[in-house]
Amino acid sequence: MEGTAVRGRLTWQTATVGAVIDETSKVRTLSLDVPDWGGHQAGQHLDIALTAEDGYRAERSYSIASAPGEPVAITVERLDDGEVSPYLTQDVQIGDEIEVRGPIGGYFIWDPPVSGDGPLLLAAGGSGVVPLRAILRHRGLVGSSVPVHLLYSVRSQAEVIYRSELDHLNQEADGVKVIYTLTRQQPPGWTGYARRVDQQMMAEVAWPVASGPLAYVCGPTNFVEAVASDLVALGYPPLRVKTERFGATGTP
Amino acid sequence: MSPISRGFHRRHEEAEPAGRVPPGQYVTHDFPVLSAGPTPRTRLTDWTFSIEGGQSPVSWTWQEFQSLPTETVTVDIHCVTRWSKLDTSWKGVSLDVLLGAVSYTAPYVLAFCDGGYTTNLPVADLLGGKAWVAYSYDGSALPAEHGGPARLLVPHLYFWKSAKWVRGLRLRDTNAPGFWEMYGYHMYGDPWKEQRYAGD
């Protein structure tokens, strides 16, 4: 767990909402024009601040959904009892201004020269796919040939975020394979996984330890605990399993 | 001047007790888990707690640690990811007791843990009834995902300073950054001053 250099101060700045894409009925991607963005790495997050007319201010952290070099984007899942996510997924409009600062976090990142050329295992639970999508886009943009398995656990096909992009990656046969497990509801004729992740699934999906894989696991706590402990049981060195968890009412 | 988000307003009107919740935090009733890697599982027979860097090193086995005087405390905890949890109940050994077993002059410690995590703290923040090595939460053994068998508990600082799976302290003359501090998080982490990131 070695670190990199300490960075300078992170200051708040005003960003403008540039585009809005509805990914599912509850999930929306916002692209943000940030005038003074110093760049980010795949897997980092940023902070958003909203200020109400009465001066009330709320801050939240969101994973960055776009690759380094692309316009900053976040993908937000609406939590019905949430305070910030309903606004960002329903009320915000193109041209609105919100405050951001970042990028934040330097451990859950994929940086091709530093991260080596072992195969990548990406495991996403629900909206945990967001930082992993930044990694996939980065891989495409830099022309990396590192082989990738993305295991994406989601309740139903309708809740798959970035579905057309992921299906396109799957069809391109360019070294990325997306494996879904639909845990609650499956379409007629579904032949893929239809259960929560378990050790047998991980054994089938994970790259062999001997190939020097690097794993990124992001999702709700139970999902991450299951995947990470299954990978360790399969022989993955713990330092090759990077995790990012969110609790029931935790971040995003 | 912050731009106003029209239509955005406070959703959770239940009044938080005055002075209990630091700026920028919201109260949660869950206990979210945030860790950078897999949850380590250390057998109690292999567990020790050590203090290094003093005049002579000290170390306790799990059994020895259990025979140290304990305190039960109820405290509020504040995570840098903005959740706060009020009235959490812990049992553990005060750092006053543990550091009292060592002769030292160093003003800082680097806490070290199973899994490779570290965090830096001033010794002064560990003394005076402000910090513990806790092994029980809410009356039960501390679950592994929350840092069991034992974690630091330093509730007056952001919770990443309360290192999970703690195995010891290294006394140091200089304030060297730990794991998250090297990635840009604040060297001290006072939630009341919103010291989230370097420079805050």
Image (spheres, helix red, strand yellow):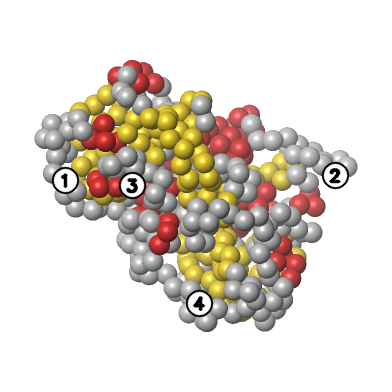
Q: Residue at x 44, y 73 (%)?
A: A11
| Residue pointed to by mark 2 | A187
| Tag shown at residue B119 | 3
Mark in front: 3 vs 2? 3
In this view of the protein, can residue A2 be seen by the observer? no
B158 vs B1, left or right, is left
Residue B8 in view here: yes
Image location of residue B40, percent across then percent down: 44, 32
Report the Cα–Cα distance between label 3 and label 1. Answer: 16 Å
Task: Kindly indicate whether the residue at mark 4 contacts the one at mark 1 (C-beta within 8 angstroms).
Answer: no
The disc at residue B135 is: none
Name the element at disc 4. strand
Of the two numbered discs 2 and 4 in the rendering, the one whose residue sits closer to the viewer: 4
Indicate the quadrant where residue A92 lies: bottom right
Dot 2 lies on which element? loop
The amino acid pointed to by label 4 is Gln
In three-dimensional space, the C-alpha distance between marks 1 and 4, rounded to whole angstroms, equals 40 Å
User: Mark 2 vs mark 4: which is more N-terminal?
Assistant: 4
Looking at the rendered structure, the secondary structure element under dot 1 is loop
Q: Nearer the viewer, residue B140 or A65?
A: B140
Amino acid on which disc 2 is placed? Pro
In the picture of the structure, the residue carrying the numbered disc 4 is A13
